[in-house]
Image: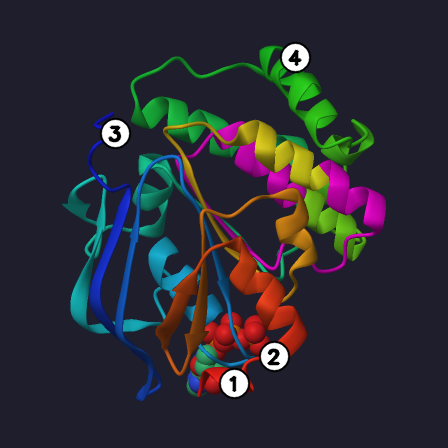
Amino acid sequence: MNLSLPLLEVKNLNVSINNNEILKDFNLTINPGEIHAIMGPNGSGKSTFSKVLAGHPAYSVLNGDIFFKGSSILELEPEQRSHLGIFLAFQYPIEIPGVSNEDFLRLAYNSKQKFYNKPEVDPIEFLSIMNEKLQLVNMSPIFLSRNVNEGFSGGEKKRNEILQMILLDSELAILDETDSGLDIDALKTISAGINNFMTSSKSILLITHYQRLLDYIKPTYVHVMQNGQIIKTGSANLAIELEKKGYEWLN
Ligand SMILES: Nc1ncnc2c1ncn2[C@@H]1O[C@H](COP(=O)(O)OP(=O)(O)OP(=O)(O)O)[C@@H](O)[C@H]1O
C-alpha cells in the first residue's frame, strides 16, 4: 500500500435523501495512520456521511467524489467497498434472526478471502481464528453460537461490531457512536481493542457525541459538523472545549 497517498479523500460531496440535501460541499482527507473524530449536533449529517461512505443505496450523490486509496468508489457496491477495506460499525447494529453469529462472521471473512484469491477457511480453522479475536474484545465464545445480535444488549451489539472490524482487518474503520450504550469497563475494553487494531497503514473515523471516548482513543483531528459541512477542525483539545462550551459559540 502507498502510504504517501491519502486513504480517503472526499471532495465537494453533495448528498440528498428524499429530495433533502444533507451533505453540502463536504470535504475531508484522511491519511494512513490518522484517527479522525467527527462531532456535531444531532441531525448535522454525521451518520449520513458514514452511510454514504459504505455505499448505502438510499442516498443520492448529487455532486463531488469519494476516493479510497486513490480510486473513486462512487460506482462500487457496498460489498465491494467492504472488500477494498472500508468497514462501517453501525450506530444501531441490526439483528439477523436465524443466522448464527459464527456463520455470519465466517461468511464475511471467507467472502473477503475469496475477493483476494486467498483460501477460504473451514469452520474449525475459523474457530481458532475467532478465539484470539474474542479475547481482544473480551467476549465469551457463547456469542458465536447465538443469532447475529438477536437479544444482545446494547453494549454486546457494539462489542460484536468491533469483533467484526477486528476480524475483517479493514484499513478504514468508521465507528458511528460505538461508545453509546457501553458501560465504563466495556468502554475501556472496546477502546483497547480499537487501539490494538490501529496501525500506521490504517485509519479510523470516529463519530461521537462525547469527549470521554477520546480519552481512550487519541484523535489526530477533531472535526465539528454542522448543516452537512465541517465547520471547524482542531486537535484533541477541541473536543474538550466542545464538552465545556457546546456548539453555539461556533456560529
Ligand atoms: N430518509 C430520510 N428522509 C428524510 N430526511 C432524512 C432521512 N434520513 C436522514 N434524514 C435527515 O438527515 C439529517 C441528518 O441525519 P444524520 O442521521 O446524518 O444526522 P447525525 O448528525 O448523525 O445525527 P445524530 O447525532 O442525531 O445521530 C437529519 O435531519 C435527518 O432527519
- In 3D space, how far apart are the residues under numbered discs 3 and 1 (Cα atoms)? 37 Å
Q: Is residue 251 visible in the rendered structure shown here?
A: yes
- In 3D space, how far apart are the residues under numbered discs 2 and 4 (Cα atoms)? 46 Å
Point out residue 61 in the picture as x, y percentages from the top left corner.
23, 71
- In 3D space, how far apart are the residues under numbered discs 2 and 1 (Cα atoms)? 7 Å
Badge 2 marks a residue whose secondary structure is: loop
Q: Residues within 10 Å of mark 4 (few under 14, many from 20)?
A: few
Point out residue 77 in the picture as x, y percentages from the top left corner.
29, 51
Point out residue 195 in the picture as x, y percentages from the top left corner.
59, 33
Please state, as top left, top right, bottom left or bottom right, where the C terminus lies in the image: bottom left
For disc 3, the marked residue is 3
Answer yes or no: do the residues labelled 3 and 4 have beta carbons within 8 Å?
Answer: no
Badge 3 marks a residue whose secondary structure is: loop
In the depicted structure, whether residue 110 falls above or below residue 53? above
Q: Which mark is residue 128?
A: 4
Q: Residue at x 39, y 22 (%)?
A: 113
Q: Residues within 10 Å of mark 2 (few under 14, many from 20)?
A: few
| Amino acid type assigned to the residue bearing label 4 in the image | Ser
Please state, as top left, top right, bottom left or bottom right, where the N terminus lies in the image: top left
- In 3D space, how far apart are the residues under numbered discs 3 and 4 (Cα atoms)? 31 Å
| Amino acid type assigned to the residue bearing label 2 in the image | Gly
Q: Residue at x 70, y 43 (%)?
A: 159
Question: Of marks 2 and 3, which one's residue comes earlier in the chain?
Answer: 3
- In 3D space, how far apart are the residues under numbered discs 2 and 3 (Cα atoms)? 36 Å
Q: Which mark is residue 246?
A: 2
